[in-house]
Amino acid sequence: MNPTCLLSALTSVVLIMTSTVPAKASVIVTNITAPPATDVILQHIPSAPETGSIAFSWTNQYEIGQSFYVKQNISISAITLPFTTFQPGALNKEFTLTIYEAGSDTESPGTALSIASDTGYLPTSLSANTFLRFELASPVDLQPDKYYIVMLRSNETGTSVNFTIANTDPQAAHSYTWHNTASGGTYARYTNRGLTIYVEGAAVVPETSTLGLIVPILGAGILLRKRFLTKNRNTPLV
């Protein structure tokens, strides 16, 4: 092919590929009246009565979140948090949702590894004593026997949403509430409080396990075919 024609063709392909790249998706937030009924693969519900709440303020890049322990390979798609009350100034405010992988149940988000992060906006209207469901921009895979932290950070000045929290939480051996009151501040960990959190997703079969199943099956098929051909070759014609 003429070099000029080849360059023109490649340029066209690049332009087509560039024009079809989708814009970055954001976290989609919906106000629901009950916790998710299906696809909940992990949840943290403090054993103590949920009589308290903690304010998530839309000022000074305030952060709040919950850690949890994962026992199996999962892919998560949404996170739901119950809340009690809110102030109108929090409506339609921007936030960032970040998922961290921690080396232990006490490692803070400040030193943990960020594995997924995206922005979104609170709804333009809310009903008190309901739930906020945060649908992730794309599923996030989590590995077994590891600790993770989900954090919300306010990105603009506003007012607060009061998330449900238990005043005591005996089940918090691997699950803690973290918060940070200002950008560049120090993360604090509640040892006697816990947010209620519902994580939607599905179990994931590791790729190596899948290959471990497929390879023996293919091997057995090849062996049977070889035996069939050998038997037919040795059978005398009538």
Image (cartoon, rainbow, N blue to C red):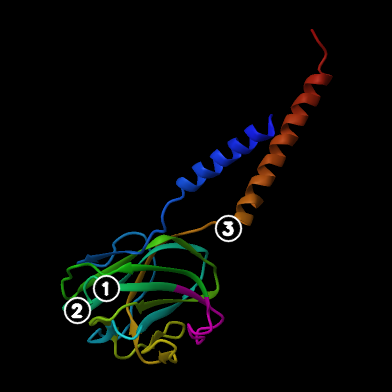
Q: Which amino acid, by three-letter code, is at mark 2?
A: Gly
Q: Secondary structure at mark 3?
A: loop
Between the C-alphas of marks 1 and 2, the distance is 8 Å
Q: Nearer the viewer, residue 57 or 157?
A: 157
Left or right: 85 as drawn, with respect to 225: left
Q: Is residue 8 above or below residue 18?
A: above
Look at the picture and state if 213 lies above or below 116. Answer: above
Identify the residue at horizontal 50%, vertical 87% (top origin). Answer: 106
Relative side of 106 to 66, left or right: right
Is 128 or 186 nearer to us in this picture?
A: 186
The disc at residue 93 is 1
Q: Which mark is residue 138?
A: none
Location of the C terminus (image quadrant):
top right
- For the point 68% across and 40% down, which residue is it? 218
How far from the left and from the top, in percent, is residue 121?
Answer: 29, 68
* Mark number displayed over residue 89: 2
Instruction: Tell me which corner region of the image, top left, top right, bottom left or bottom right, holds residue 169.
Output: bottom left
Mark in front: 1 vs 3? 1
Is most of the magenta stretch helix, strand or loop? loop
The picture quadrant where one finds residue 232 is top right
Label 3 environment density (alpha carbons within 10 Å; few <14, some 14–19, many ≥20): few
